Image (tube, rainbow, N blue to C red):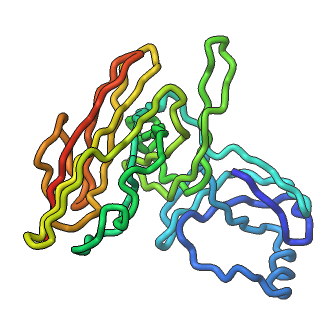
Amino acid sequence: MTIENKTGTDFPEATIQLMAGDVAKIQDLRARDRAAMAMNQNAMILASAGPQVTQKAFDDFHLYDLHRTVSLRNEETKQVQFLEATNVTVRRTYQFEGNGPVTQGFYPGYHNDQIGSSNSGNTRVSIFEEIKNSESNHLGMPLPGGRLRLYRRDTGGQMQFVGENMILHTPAEQTFKVISGSAFDLTAARRQTDFKVDNMKRVMDESFEIKLSNQKAQLVTINTVEHMGRGENWEITAKSSEFTKRDSSTIDFPVTVPAKGEAILTYTVHYSW
């Protein structure tokens, strides 16, 4: 955790506790509030960062105790280890999202190029890191929200930084997922191959082709996520791969792409209104 002292005074022996949760707080402290804080040599410094400490439920939040004091001078920033765990399993997945979440709504009479982006310029495949915050995964403590940094050892044994992102407050036994970057050797290209609309019958059909490329030495599965943004009533009428439905307007095609090769996904969606 990172602690910054902006109170205007030194704390030779500050007792550090952390309150995690969405605590409502007025941002601008008045001068008398600053003075009162400076007078308290056992100041409770509130922080929210990523988590060997003990914790307990307090009110509707979580209170963490480091069981030590820290010397903290005015305008000084310190980093203190909060949680250490080994053998934590991290599940890595890849995802391509070619058209992004689109606002629902298709209006009869609109031409194709007036209904938002069908062919985005996105070619990046995102890297997702998934971690189960459970005792079986050598964690299991409620984790305060904050910055999560990821490192991996290279072939020479050197630790290399491979990405960072923010996590939300995560209770025990829940799973959190972060994007750590875009895969260098994985790319994708999405294009619309057909589009038909009949305003009299109040129907529309749209077809897409998504080419997924893999230059890695091993095969990978890319979760190809598509958003059905033209309207609320839709049906997939043709597909080259099976999919799962994430919600009422989002589907996920898990496509296996061979090493040093490519895979092509095609599908057609039928809208009615």
Residue 72: x percent and y percent?
86, 57
Residue lying farthest to the left in this orientation: 201
Q: In this view, does 266 lie above or below 108?
A: above
Residue 64 horizontal side relative to residue 126, left or right: right
Q: Where is residue 90 in the image (x, y as percent from the top left)?
A: 45, 33
**Residue drawn at 51 percent across, 32 percent down:** 183
> Residue 132, located in which quarter of the rendered image?
top left
Which quadrant is the C terminus positioned in?
bottom left
Viewer-closest of 217 and 16: 217
Left of 70 or right of it: where is 240?
A: left
Displayed quadrant of residue 257: top left
**Residue 11 rendering spot, x and y as whole percentages:** 87, 63
Q: Is residue 134 visible?
A: no
Residue 191 shown left or right of residue 196 in the figure: right
Q: Which of 150 and 257 is in front in this view?
A: 257
Task: Please name whichever residue, 50 or 231, is drawn nearer the observer in this view of the structure.
Answer: 231
Residue at 31% over, 26% down: 263
x 48%, y 32%: residue: 88
User: In this view of the protein, which residue sits in the foreground, 29 or 246?
Assistant: 246
The answer to whether residue 256 is above or below residue 235 is above
Q: Write the residue at 60% across / 65% down.
A: 19
Number of marks:
0
Q: Can residue 208 be seen in this view?
A: yes
Across and down, in percent, residue 125 comes to 45, 38
